[in-house]
Image (cartoon, rainbow, N blue to C red):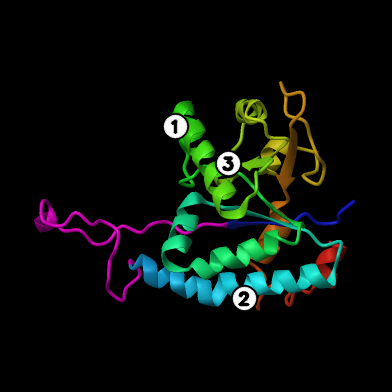
Amino acid sequence: MPSVCFYFQVHQPFRVKRYRIFDIGQDHEYFNDCGNGNLNNRRIIEKVARKCYLPTNALIFDLLREHPEFKVSFSLSGVVLDQFEQCAPEVIASFQKLISTGRVELLSETYYHSLAFLYSRDEFEEQVSAHRLKVKKLFAFTPRVFRNTELIYNNDLAKMAEEMGYVGILAEGADHILGWRSPNFMYRPAGCSKIKLLLKNYRLSDDIAFRFSERSWRDFPLTADKFAQW
């Protein structure tokens, strides 16, 4: 039984460039800001690829080689995959290398990292299908577990995911929903017969996502041994 189940969300939005009223009818390119600011999508993708995605994937690949029991999952939005293809194909290659180990799983989600489920079930199904096809095309992998954007969840979503063939779904381990229950167990959603519900332990997750580099934190520095004890 694994002590910790790691999954990492990878997403970068297409940032809309500065668009003035005078540009209407003259400029039909809304995204590709060629300046040096924070709206240049290519510049941002190349930067985060160099400083984050490539070194992290290299580290995870080394861990997979060193520890046969180690496994990890990723959720890659369709939007970030599009940008990798256009601006940083080496990142796609690094994920392909990880998946080739047989111990890296990809999750399914909406293509545009959207809230489509809350507004249009048809749009939701189209986006999930498009994302599944994209993952299959790039990585020859068919996801079996679903995560909705920002882990937004209800039992209707779980039922729909089950009908779409998924065997698992992720959700936020929210205290006001769980009450006395623990997020560290697997649950079965109400109204479902097969799909399993896995919850995020937000406290442990936030220790890595937000507090890891916070020097004023009482538990700084966070080591693997310390984290494993929690």
Element type where label 1 sits in the image: helix
Q: Amino acid at mark 1?
A: Glu
Report if residue 26 lies within the magenta region. Answer: yes
Q: Residue at x 47, y 59 (%)?
A: 12
The answer to whether residue 177 is left or right of residue 226 is left
Q: Which residue is mark 3?
A: 148
Question: Residue 152: image x %, image y %?
Answer: 58, 40
Measure the C-alpha gap from mark 1 to mark 3.
Answer: 14 Å
Q: Earlier in the sequence, mark 2 or mark 3?
A: 2
Q: Amino acid at mark 3?
A: Asn
Q: Nearer the viewer, residue 10 or 154?
A: 10
**Tag shown at residue 123:** 1
Element type where label 3 sits in the image: loop
Q: Earlier in the sequence, mark 1 or mark 3?
A: 1
* Pointer 3 local density, CA inside 10 Å: few below 14, some 14–19, many at least 20: many
Q: Which residues are magenta?
A: 10-39
Q: Which residue is mark 2?
A: 55
Q: Looking at the magenta stretch, what is its main secondary structure?
A: loop
Regarding residue 125, the answer to whether it shows in the image is yes
Regarding residue 219, the answer to whether it shows in the image is no
Q: Residue at x 12, y 52 (%)?
A: 24
The answer to whether residue 119 is left or right of residue 221 is left
Residue sticking out furthest to the right:
1
Report if residue 53 lies within the magenta region. Answer: no
**Tag shown at residue 162:** none
